[in-house]
Image (spheres, helix red, strand yellow):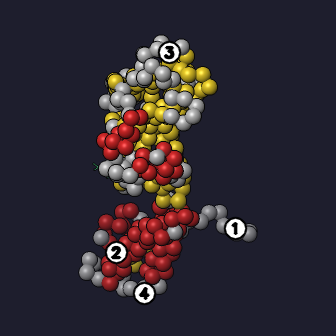
Amino acid sequence: MAFYEAYSHPVLIRYRTSVCTKATLFLFVVLCLTYISPLLVAYRSQGFWVKRSTYEEQPVVRFQYQTLVVASTNTKGDYVAWSTFPNFNNMLGPNLRIPTISVQEQDQNQDGKLDRLILDMQLPLKPEEEVYSVQLLLTFSYQLFRMSTVVMQSLAYIQYSSPVPGAQLFVAGDLKLQQRVPLPHRGLYNVYNVSVIDGSSPFASAYNLVDIIRAYHELTTALSCPSPVWSVGRATGSPFRLSAEISYPLETIKCAWIQYVSVLLVFLWVFTRVQTFVFQNQVLPTLPVPMVKPHLMTRTR
Ligand SMILES: *[C@@H]1O[C@H](CO)[C@@H](O)[C@H](O)[C@H]1NC(C)=O
């Protein structure tokens, strides 16, 4: 009668040793190499092992009470302006108009994080002045905590112009995160925690809107404002009114994380084989105990 292999299973061999032996040291070194080397590999070859994913977070946004407003009063380039920066205001001379402002930040869903900013500005004008365009810049501090701690200073920029002089501009929009690079998945990320406007600067260039927007960086916020409302028909002598409702929405954030587990699997595979070789061939002296029946095992111990 022909025999065939009905079933097979590997034999378990135990290798016994005491604590202070070369074998123990070997095991310890292998353990360290298995779990620490993948970390080093992952750190050194970030580009290859980095995985990208996304998560959602409600950012912590605070209005910083820094404002810069410029309104053109005719189509020839005359303007009036005001800011919260004394150096800039001093440079304005007769173009300075000090508005009345009310600002309110609200936490509508009571989650402890502010959800929107309501700003109302009334810009006084001389009787002969009209407003054809408005530029408004507001700065915010913006923070994320869920994965990495991100701290940055950001801005909202509102601009509107019309061929018809206006009485009021109303904007309602979202302060959206603009992310060109994925964030690290942990740690502190504060490279963009720098002022959007250098309020201490005595030079006009520091307050130039073109330069401010140009210097603005890879991680930013921008106001998405689909439908600004320009109202006309301002009564002579009444101020120009600028109202803004800016929401701080829930953000989907791109992040990068190092794929430790995938590297670890490779190391586990390699080192399991190394250990099998070392013990099977008795490279280090240990006492092999072949698998025995359970009732005999108690006796061998
Ligand atoms: C961010 O900048 C502000 C003001 O410049 C500073 O008070 C704060 O400590 C900074 N935060 C971090 C985490 O760097």
Q: Label 2 near label 1: C-beta < 8 Å? A: no
Residue ID for mark 1: 4
| In front of the other: 17 or 246 | 246
Disc 3 residue: CB within 8 Å of ligand 1: no
Q: Is mark 4 within 8 Å of ligand 1?
A: no
Image vertical order of residue 199 relative to residue 75, above or below: below
Instruction: Say whether marks 4 and 1 touch (CB < 8 Å).
Output: no
**154 relative to 51 in the view: left or right:** left
Name which residue lies at 48% across and 78% down.
274
Asked whether the beta carbons under mark 3 and mark 2 sit within 8 Å of each other, the answer is no
Kindly identify the amino acid type of the residue bearing the numbered disc 1: Tyr
**What residue type is disc 3 on?**
Arg
Q: Residue at x 31, y 50 (%)?
A: 200
Give the residue number, with chain letter if any, for mark 2: 28
Looking at the picture, how far across and down is residue 221, in whole percent?
Answer: 48, 41
> Is residue 192 shown to the viewer in this render?
yes
How far is mark 1 from mark 3, CA to CA? 101 Å
In front: mark 3 or mark 4? Answer: 3
Residue to which mark 3 is pinned: 234
Q: CA distance from mark 3 to mark 2?
A: 82 Å
Q: Earlier in the sequence, mark 1 or mark 2?
A: 1
User: Considering only vertical position in the picture, is 172 above or below 256?
Assistant: above
Q: Report the disc number at residue 219.
A: none
Horizontal placement of 246 versus 226: left or right? left
* Residue 166 image position (x, y, % from top left): 53, 20
**In front: mark 3 or mark 2?**
3
- Dot 4 and dot 2 residues touching (CB under 8 Å): no
